[in-house]
Structures are given as structure tokens and as C-alpha cells.
Amino acid sequence: MIEIDDVGLAKAITINSNNQNSIKPRDLKSTNEVQVRLKREFEKRFAGTYSFEIKRGESAAEGLEIITNEEAGRLLLAFDLNEPETCHQVYKLFDDKYSEIFARPAVTADRVVFLHRIMEVIQTCMAEIEYKPLSKYGLTRFFLLSCISLLLQKDQGCRNIVKNPREIFESGDIDAFLNAVGEALRSMIIDLNYEVKTRGETFDYKGDLKSPVKVRDLRSELLKSYEKELAKGKIKPISVVMAASTVS
């Protein structure tokens, strides 16, 4: 065991000496200051609830729910960068797109847990997708997360929540917010079911959800339908539904 103060040298030795065991970009980034900061934030902000795993094989205290930095990267990629079509390319999370995904002041433990909670709602609603191969497809949940991201950004009453998720946890309104997101999502899934039926055999869910152009097209159609329902008064904005729930 040799202790080295030079971080750069330590990484170089690790990379060049590890010829027998496979080493992944995620493992190399486990000592990155951003990952270390996030892990410490989790320990401070969500002690007793969540554990942030930054390296394969890490152990967590019993009873904690584990959120891996791989899952966090995919959530951030879909929600913040609106690129759900690349969430299957896990290798990019800690390589090509690492800085773009993680190295931003907005990326905090609160943000990761916030997106994780929204994803839990999405996964609950996935059963309402009528075309079962689509409901079980890995990229579908990230596509829906990107749709929710745009809905929240268009909703003036939700912009501050998206910008600073910590406030929603500290206010105690997180459950009301998630319930409102669930209502919006179920409405959107109704339109998604219609779009899938309309497109028929031309809809190749595996290929389409990996295509930036087709993802933007489908997402645009769903958002248009949602906005029409808002204009007709058939549904209410997420912020309004949340406020009503909070008051009651």
C-alpha cells in the first residue's frame, strides 16, 4: 500500500497498472471532487434516507435507499439537458458528457433526490401506457421525464421549484407537488396512447426513442395536446393542482 499526495499521478498509476481488472470511467470519477461533494451532501441532507453510490461495490448502511451516480447522471441528462434519447449510452455519463451533466452548480443532492422522486411517480404511471412493449422499454421513463421537465419550465408557478428543489423539501410540499405531477403525467399518457395508435406500424419505439428528431417530434405533439387541454380548462397547471392540495 503506497500513499501518494499527487492526485494526477495516482490516477495515472491506477489506469496504467490495472491491466487485469476492467476499470470503468465511473470508477475513475469516484474520486472526482464533484462526486465526493455530492456524496457528502447526501450524508448531510438525507442521512437515514438515501445513500449516494459513486463506485461499484460500495456498501451502504442498512435501511437506506441507494441512488447510484449512474442513475443520477441519466436523470440529469433527461431532465436538465433534455436528451432522453442518449440515456442508454451509459458510458457517456462519465466520459464525453461528464462535465455537462455533473459539473454544474445546480447539481446538488437535493436536485438528484428531487428527480429521483419524480421518476418514482413516472414508474408508477408506466402501467397506464397501453402499448406494453413501450411501457417496459428502458428509455420510455426518461422520455417522460424530459416531457415533465418542459411542462414544469412552462409553468410559471413551478420554475422556482425546478431551479431550487431544496425549497420544496424544506417547505414540506413535496408530496403535494408529486401528486400534481402524477395528474399531469396521466393526462399526457392518454395522449401518448393516442399518438402510438395513430402512428400504427410506423411507430418503431426502439428506434424512435433513440432518435433526437423523433423524440422532439413526439414530445412536441404531447406538449401541444397538453396545452390544448389547459386552454379548454379540462386540466389545471401543476402549480395550481399543487396549491389546491396544499390548502386542503
Image: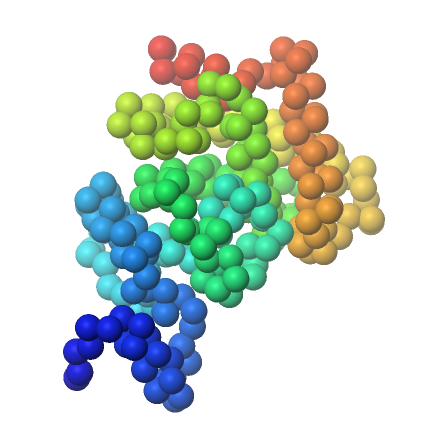
Q: Is residue 223 above or below residue 53?
A: above
Q: Is residue 38 above or below residue 222?
A: below
Q: Is residue 26 above or below residue 177?
A: below
Observer able to see residue 124 = no
Which residue is painted at 36% across and 15% down in the image?
246
Which residue is painted at 39% across and 40% down in the image?
106
Residue 236: x, y in percent?
55, 16
Q: Is residue 209 above or below residue 114?
A: below
Residue 140: x, y in percent?
60, 47
Residue 28: x, y in percent?
36, 70
Residue 109 placement, left or right of 5: right
- Judge by depth and name the residue closer to the eye, 47 or 130: 47
**Image mark count:** 0
Residue 224: x, y in percent?
70, 26
- Judge by depth and name the residue closer to the eye, 41 or 174: 41
Q: Quadrant of residue 69?
A: bottom left
Which residue is painted at 62% across and 34% down in the image?
189
Q: Quadrant of the N terminus?
A: bottom left
Structure colour scheme: rainbow
Q: Quadrant of the C terminus?
A: top left
Which residue is painted at 81% across and 44% down in the image?
200
